[in-house]
Amino acid sequence: MVFQVKKFWFVVFLLETCMASVQNIGRLKLGFQGAQMNWIDNDGMIIVSNNSNFAFGFNPTRDVTLFQLVVIHQGSSTIVWSANRANLIRNSDFFIFDTTGNAYLQSGGSTIWSTNTANKGVAAMELLDSGNLVLVGNDSSIIWQSFSNPTNTLLSSQEFKEGMKLVSNPNSNNLSYSLEIKNGDMILSAGYQPPQPYWAMGKDTRKIINQDGGNVISATLSANSWRFYDSSKVLLWQFLFPDNMNGNATWVAVLGNDGFITFSILQTGASNASPTKIPQDQCGSPAACDPYFICYGGNKCQCPSTLPSCNMGNVSFCNTAQNSVELVNAGDGLGYFALGFVPPSSTTDLNGCKAFCQGNCSCAAMFFDSSSGNCFLFDQIGSLQGSSNGPQYASYIKVLGSAGNGGNQGGGGGGGGGTNKTRSIIVIVIVISTVFVIIGLLSAGYCYYQKKNKKLPESPKQSSDEENFWENLTGMPVRFSYNDLQTATKNFSVKLGQGGFGSVYHGVLLDGTQLAVKKLEGIGQGKKEFRAEVSIIGSIHHLHLVRLKGFCAEGSHRLLVYEYMAYGSLDRWLFKKDKGEFMLDWETRYSIALGTAKGLAYLHEDCDVKIVHCDIKPENVLLDDHFHAKVSDFGLAKLMTREQSHVFTTLRGTRGYLAPEWITNYAISEKSDVYSYGMVLLEIIGGRKNYDPSESSGKSHFPTYAFKMLEEGKLKDILDASLKINEEDERVSTAIKVALWCIQDEMSLRPPMTKVVQMLEGIYPVPPPPPCQIGSRLYANFFNSMSQEGTGTGTGSSSGPSDCNSDAYLSAVRLSGPR
């Protein structure tokens, strides 16, 4: 009997295994689960289109032990879509199409890709004859499709719309390229920081104009042309391929890792490539040559003779002494691919342009157009262009100079050489002796410390518990190894910024995805706190919150991996030293203010646990490449249960944005974030810091001045003078009144962030705020006293107003200490 039962289950298992490897034609039902090892007899392909041209399944990479989930053209073996370029899987990892209608990839117990279509009415998965992988409902409506989520390839009839992005695989220098439709045009950009555009269809002379005017919203490959349409589907432009090709064939456009878009016909055996390329110029791609090399016709690359070397690597001039950095003239008549597509950094003369670059440690190269006075600064550069037909630019490259690199290499002559030699020997002996003494003292101190603070090593049980916790954590971001992040950041070589809890570095994954990696240092929090932070913050997804994409918890290493924000922090664009530089217009500022408010409202009201950010300031509002605002840096966040309305906590945050309750040691709540947001909103409106000692005494403390101007009806005096605004735009008055409501001293008077959003959107009316309060005067006086101390013209005791609490004032002064 036992033998019969075993035999029965063996037969069932055998049937299931055999059924699992039967290829699906055109359609896959709900409730599927399979790994590459189950489909090896079908070359890993799970679904084949009805016309057999396309297949969906597992495809091996160069490392034959790793796989991608792809849609592939079977005749030419061309991959036209991939689910997991960034996270390759092994042959035992599962693709699952569950009964809720969600399709996803699992690797090591973690979900690395998903269509996020659970409980949205999905009835089946279909692979269409066009190569489009779709999830359809019972009424055959498309709920999700690969055509709306392209990778680096576009197919015939695939509509490429505004908001989508094509991203190439990274090249040997870890640089990737992107194609998108924005500002009414199709733009190619190199993935530098920030992105550098190098081609636009609007500037390509090969296009055929069907109708002047109009903004491009979508583009489609049709027969042997690329067609561009406006929002009403009116054909604006056409970009034709050679007419002798088969116009009825399936065309494919691929953004390669060399930065060029190529066109070809998919057919059995191989793809029939068109000679047409985008851009047309061989030197028009950022990687036509290696960085700093000059590209000449015929793909000839040459390093400028004036440079000591073109192999400079990732040099950070921000960590280098100013006197050891110099600008070197790269030569006359050179061009650079991005110059026709980016706005100038400033308008000045040649010396002014050089001074701007020297004064900006992020500047790696500068270009100056003498005819217009336009000065262009770049943080990173690709290859240069020789024999430019456009404006003649003066080109300068920043290099490390000889200052500080040693003494005279040529010798002195006469008797001085012997004296210098003797002095050098004496110096070397002194230095070596000093080093040995320091090492001895440090060793003795370390041994003493170890004796006094001897701790048992972490037990295997504790280590095992830690691993079990992370492995059993579901729905979390990707867990990276320390080596993965070390490789992605090139050993943490490109620093984006420094925060209170560590440094943030730029990183790039193998698929070209850019990251911001925060290396936590001296955070003073244990395993439980770090677990809680990753568990709660990692599950938060909102359009206006910087997303936590992953983390590392390995040994003593604690790192957080965030999405990369191309345009950096708001303060970079708001507080420009040179008023001639690019400034944010009113529409963009209002959008940033509203987006920031929505992000905070989500933290306060829509999370399972109420989150008080505690450090809202322009530096923590990041901007993507469309200037969409996202709130970042939850390192100071205070988690509160729904039952808590106020909590006591240690002093945290940034001076100038702290609510009065922080300084007076009262309990804080989400209304403390509202106060900080109000300060940021005022700075967005005024384009200046909330305290500026260079202004007159009446204007130096901006909130006090804003209250006064509102009372006098002079709203225009509060606005940034550089802004051009329609006087009938009611949002100006709305924004000012909302900001002044938010910075009320009395916590109960401040509106919740949900109400702030409603007021900014015009849904809820904004009544006039109460007048300036004592706390505002306290802040104003505190900043004035700081200014006086800095110039030696006053003392702390003489600057306090008679109606301010002296203890509160002293608390404010203590904020200048390290946090």
Image (spheres, rainbow, N blue to C red):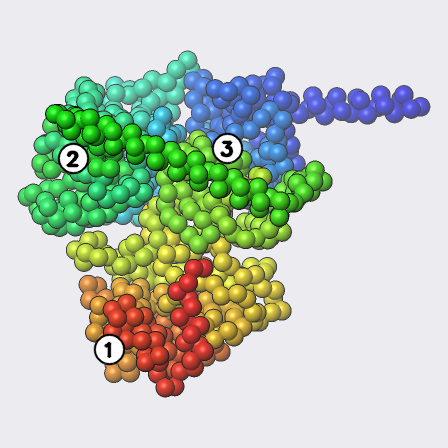
State whether residue 599 is above or below residue 347.
below
- Residue ID at (29%, 83%): 711
Q: Nearer the viewer, residue 233 or 572?
A: 572
- Residue ID at (60%, 35%): 106
Percent x, y of residue 302:
19, 22
The image quarter in which residue 431 lies: top left
**Marks 2 and 3 close (CB-CB < 8 Å):** no
> At numbered mark 2, what does the secondary structure look like: helix, strand or loop?
strand
Q: Is residue 545 left or right of residue 537?
A: left
State whether residue 751 is above or below residue 232.
below
Question: Is residue 765 shown to the viewer in this render?
Answer: no
The quadrant in which the C terminus is found is bottom left
* Callout 1 amino acid: Gly
- Residue ID at (12%, 42%): 368
Q: Residue furthest left?
A: 371
Percent x, y of residue 191:
33, 37
> At numbered mark 1, what does the secondary structure look like: helix, strand or loop?
loop
Residue receiving disc 1 = 698
Residue 24 got which mark?
none
Residue receiving disc 3 = 483
Real-space CA distance between mark 1 and mark 3, rounded to the nearest whole angstrom: 55 Å
Mark 2 vs mark 1: in front: 2
Real-space CA distance between mark 2 and mark 3, rounded to the nearest whole angstrom: 37 Å
Percent x, y of residue 785:
31, 74
Of mark 2 and mark 3, the one earlier in the sequence is: 2
* Callout 2 amino acid: Val
Q: Nearer the viewer, residue 750 or 341?
A: 750
Count the numbered circles shown. 3
